[in-house]
Structures are given as structure tokens and as C-alpha cells.
């Protein structure tokens, strides 16, 4: 009998697909399936797409660097966090849930296995680099094919800054990853302390600086704006349908297949194929059909608001990570709450009738052009990783942790930071830090979840690989698609996972 982690070898059939989840993983899945001719209906619990973790991430697209949560350093940080008050550490872990909930207990055991396995960490590093390159290629290809202008999703090629405040020992650790990045072909510079202070002389935090590294290749982009444009294209060009305010709660099964999705308000959405891409909610929905998806919420906190051009200059270089607090800071090109459209081509001027010979020159207009409104930008701060069930609301102490650290870095924005709403989003975390893009024990049920802290970076690639799992087709890119087995659900079966921990299997 198939267990909860097994994957059917039978091919799926049919052309109607129900996708659950309107984040970057779900919308990317819908796009690539609709492109292959499937009749796609996407369900999302929110009134608009991308209102969860996809709208709260830092907006960075860094191909070169991966910091696995499954590391001995994380375990040390967790132990340290248990000895301080809530809101005094970037991590918040509730040990009681790992002790009393069987699914969380199994997650914790697998997580510790990955932490202790150098073989798994090495595999993670290589696989993530491959997946990141593949996904970045897809972003470029989709933008080119579908005519997405950079301005529509706030893309800018600004590089990325790693800031070390207050801690000289931490600054000394910048050199090894920079050397690795340069070896891999990603230009990275580590500045000496005098160089750092000279470059950041006008910033409010220059006195606290102990070191800085700069990566040339990363770019930024607004994940939510990207996925909303992708949804529009999927609908207008490929016929996909998007249904909001629709919370999926369970799966219907019959005859060894999933027949559709039930919602909390009593509706049923039938489909030949079902894709669960509901982030941290995926596990609960899959469990209704006896499918085990080892994903728990890693909640992050974020705020954003509009700033002037002058304020943007005063905050210093961005995007930036301040490692002492885990604070991420990004400045986007558009103001908060606004969505820019690609500029339409200017119409050709109407031909001017020639003036009669000897006529006086036409008088200049007496109406002066109105001064253009000041272009506003948008700053986003994000931080924290809180491991707690989705049933628990956001923690005020963690929201205050974000506010406090943002104000310490940019005190000139303190008044704005104090009044901004802090939002919480749940990143779907797996025990081994790799996503789950896979079939299940049902030949027509597929999972696309577990992007962890890299959902924006990996989302397009995960969507394309989900479509490949369904129909066997994948877009051609300069970077070939990673091996699907690396993200298969059956890697979590006991024997297979133990082999990975011990390094006897990949």
C-alpha cells in the first residue's frame, strides 16, 4: 500500500487543471500549464493574487548565494534565542509544537538529520545554484516572450550589499563566500573597513560599520507585480481562470484519483488534474487525501511605504542585508500601492500644414507646462523567521523587532516606521531546505510548495518543473532543468531520507 510520501508512476490524463494557491508558485504553475493547452482554474483564498509571502519578500533575485537553514549555525541561533525574551532575536521557535505534534516532531527529526549531514548540505548547495540559474533564465525568457517591461515589476540591476554592523568577527567571515562566488563566476567585492567607511560616509549607520561586501549580478523585482502580470497574460493569452476569495479545505478522491477540490463555503471545483501550490497551507489540504507534505510555516514580518527621491538617497545603498539583525532593506522604483504600466509608444505627430509665404511666425503658447509631480519610491523592510502554526496570529513582539531594527539603521524614517502596518507572511519551509515539486501517490495530484526563503528566486523554475511533471514538457533555457528527483516527495520516505543523511544515496 502506498504511503503518504510515495509517488505514482502512472501517467495522468485529462486537460482540466485546478491549481490551489495564488502566490508565485501557483501562478507560475498556472502559466506554464496554460501555455501547454490545459484549461486551468486557479483558486486563491485572498481577493487578489500574491497577498501572502509573495508580497512580503525582500524582492532580491540572487542566483549565487544560498544560506541553508539546515546548518549547525541555525541550531546554535535557535538555542541562543530560547534564552532571550520574545522579540529580542530574529528567530522565534516554539519547542512545544515540535514535542506534541507528530508532524512537527517528524519535521524536526528530518531537519536535524539534514543539519548533521555534510553530504545533504553539499547537495543542497549545488542543487540550489542550478535551480536559481534555471529560474533566472526563465524570468528573462518570459519577460522577452510576453513583452513584460522592467517598469511593470520594478526590476532594477543594482547588485546587492551585505552590511556588517557592530561585529568585527562577523565581518571577517565575508571573505570565504566572496572567494567562492568569484570562483563560480559571480563578481563579488569585499571592502576593507576604511573603504567601507569612505563609501558609506553619508549614511546614518557609518559609525557602526565593520565590513561590507558587494555582489554585482543580483537584481531586484517586485514578486507580486510580476505574478499579477503573469496571471493577466495567462488569462488574456492562454485562457486561464482565476477565482479569488476561495479557500480550499479538502480534496475529493474516487477510484484511486483526486476528483476535485472542496472549499470552506461548500463549493466543489472538479478537475482532471489538481496542483497544490498553497504554500504553508499545502500540507493541511494534502492530508485530507492521505498525502504527507513535510512543510511548516516560517513566518516573516515586513513593512513598506513610499519615500521621496531625497529620502531614498539618504538611506544608503540598497538592496542590503544587515546581518547583525537579519534586516533586509530594498528600495523599489515605484511608490507604495501603485502599479506602473509599460509606456505606450508615442503616436507620430500629425503633419503640420505649411504656413503661407510671408506669414508671421506662430506665437508661442502662453500656458506654461505644469510642474511634474515628484516621483516617489518605495522602501521595504523585512526580517524574522518564526516557526509556529498558521492558527496562531502574528506576534506583536516580532513586529516590534522589525520596527526597532529598521529605526536603528535609518533613524530619519523613524516617524514613518512607527505608524506603518507590519504584515506577516508564511514561507513554506521543508526539512532539507529544498522545494517539493512532485507527483504524489495519486497519478493526477501534484505538489508545488516549499520554496522556503527562496520562493521568489525559485518560483518561475518551480512552475516550469511542475508543468514538466504533469506533461513532460519544459521550456528550453541556457541552463538546463535540474533533475526532478531532487525535489520529489518520495525523498522523505524513511529509507530514502536516511540514505541521504548518511550520504549513501542522492
Image (tube, rainbow, N blue to C red):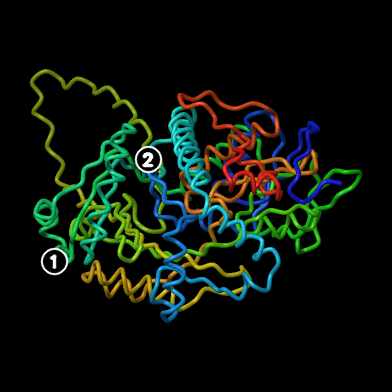
Residue found at the far top of this picture: 357
Residue 312 image-quadrant placement: bottom left
Location of mark 2 (residue): 64
**CA separation, marks 1 and 2?**
29 Å
N-term mark: 1 or 2: 2
Q: Residue at point 54% right, 32% down?
A: 482
Apparent side of residue 449 relative to residue 193 in the rendered image (left or right): right
Q: Farthest right residue?
A: 255
Name the foreground residue: 5 vs 36: 5
Pointer 1 residue: 207
Rendering coords of residue 246 (x, y %):
69, 58
Residue 149 location, quadrant: top left
Position above or below: 469 against 290: above
Work out whether residue 2 or residue 41 is closer to the camera in this orientation and state it. 2
Q: Position of residue 13 (x, y in %)?
A: 80, 32
Q: Is residue 96 visible?
A: yes
Quick one: label 1, few (<14), some, or many (20+) residues within 10 Å? Answer: few
The residue lying at 61 percent from left, 41 percent from top is 487
Quadrant location, the C terminus = top right
With 44 as the anchor, is 59 left or right in this view? left
Query: Could you say where residue 501 lies in the image, as x and y percent from the top left?
Result: 58, 48
Image spot of residue 10 (x, y percent): 81, 33
Against 422, is 278 above or below?
A: above
Local packing at callout 2 (Cα closer than 10 Å; few below 14, some 14-19, many 20+) is many
Q: Is residue 273 left or right of residue 426?
A: right
Outermost residue to the bottom: 85
Q: Nearer the viewer, residue 266 or 322?
A: 322
Q: Secondary structure at mark 1?
A: helix
Disc 2 secondary structure class:
loop
The mark found on residue 79 in the picture is: none
Amino acid at each position: 500500500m502506498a504511503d503518504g510520501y510515495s509517488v505514482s508512476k502512472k501517467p495522468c490524463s485529462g486537460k482540466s487543471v485546478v491549481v490551489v494557491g495564488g502566490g508565485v508558485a501557483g501562478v507560475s504553475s498556472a502559466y506554464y500549464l496554460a501555455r501547454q493547452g490545459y484549461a486551468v482554474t486557479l483558486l486563491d483564498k485572498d481577493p487578489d493574487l500574491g497577498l501572502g509571502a509573495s508580497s512580503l519578500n525582500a524582492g532580491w533575485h540572487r542566483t549565487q548565494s544560498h544560506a541553508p537553514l539546515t546548518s549547525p549555525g541555525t541550531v546554535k541561533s535557535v538555542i541562543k534565542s530560547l534564552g532571550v525574551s520574545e522579540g529580542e532575536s530574529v528567530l522565534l521557535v516554539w519547542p512545544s509544537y515540535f514535542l506534541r505534534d507528530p508532524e512537527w516532531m517528524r519535521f524536526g527529526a528530518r531537519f536535524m538529520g539534514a543539519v548533521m549531514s555534510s553530504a545533504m548540505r553539499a547537495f543542497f548547495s549545488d542543487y540550489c545554484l542550478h535551480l536559481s540559474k534555471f529560474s533566472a533564465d526563465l524570468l528573462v525568457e518570459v519577460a522577452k516572450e510576453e513583452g513584460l517591461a522592467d517598469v511593470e515589476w520594478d526590476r532594477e540591476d543594482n547588485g546587492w550589499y551585505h552590511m556588517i554592523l557592530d561585529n568585527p568577527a562577523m565581518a571577517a567571515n565575508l571573505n570565504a563566500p566572496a572567494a567562492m562566488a568569484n570562483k563560480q563566476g559571480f563578481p563579488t567585492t569585499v571592502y576593507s573597513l576604511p573603504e567601507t567607511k569612505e563609501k558609506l560616509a553619508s549614511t546614518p549607520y557609518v559609525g557602526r560599520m565593520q565590513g561590507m561586501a558587494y555582489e554585482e549580478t543580483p537584481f531586484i523585482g517586485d514578486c507580486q507585480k510580476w505574478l499579477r502580470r503573469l496571471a493577466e497574460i495567462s488569462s488574456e493569452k492562454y485562457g486561464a481562470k482565476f477565482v479569488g476569495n476561495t479557500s480550499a479545505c479538502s480534496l475529493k478522491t474516487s477510484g484511486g484519483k483526486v476528483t476535485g477540490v472542496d472549499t470552506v463555503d461548500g463549493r466543489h471545483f472538479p478537475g482532471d488534474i489538481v496542483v497544490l501550490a498553497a504554500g504553508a497551507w499545502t500540507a493541511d489540504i494534502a492530508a485530507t487525501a492521505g498525502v504527507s507534505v513535510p512543510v511548516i510555516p516560517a513566518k516573516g514580518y515586513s513593512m513598506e511605504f513610499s519615500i521621496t527621491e531625497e529620502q531614498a538617497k539618504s538611506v544608503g545603498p540598497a538592496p542590503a542585508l544587515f546581518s547583525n539583525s537579519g534586516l533586509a532593506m530594498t528600495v523599489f522604483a515605484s511608490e507604495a500601492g501603485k502599479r506602473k504600466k509599460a509606456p505606450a509608444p508615442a503616436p507620430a505627430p500629425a503633419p503640420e500644414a505649411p504656413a503661407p509665404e510671408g506669414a508671421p511666425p506662430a506665437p508661442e503658447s502662453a500656458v506654461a507646462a505644469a510642474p511634474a509631480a515628484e516621483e516617489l519610491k518605495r522602501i521595504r523592510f523585512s526580517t524574522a523567521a518564526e516557526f509556529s502554526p498558521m492558527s496562531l496570529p502574528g506576534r506583536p513582539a516580532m513586529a516590534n523587532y522589525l520596527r526597532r531594527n529598521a529605526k536603528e539603521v535609518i533613524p530619519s524614517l523613524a516617524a514613518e516606521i512607527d505608524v506603518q502596518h507590519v504584515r506577516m507572511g508564511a514561507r513554506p519551509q521543508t526539512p532539507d531546505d529544498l522545494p517539493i515539486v512532485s507527483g504524489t501517490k495519486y497519478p493526477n495530484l501534484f505538489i508545488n510548495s516549499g520554496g522556503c526563503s527562496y520562493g521568489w528566486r525559485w518560483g518561475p523554475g518551480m512552475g516550469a518543473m511542475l508543468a514538466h511533471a504533469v506533461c513532460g514538457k519544459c521550456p528550453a533555457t541556457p541552463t538546463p532543468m535540474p533533475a526532478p528527483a531532487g525535489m520529489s516527495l518520495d525523498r522523505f520516505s524513511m529509507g530514502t531520507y536516511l540514505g541521504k543523511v548518511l550520504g549513501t544515496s542522492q
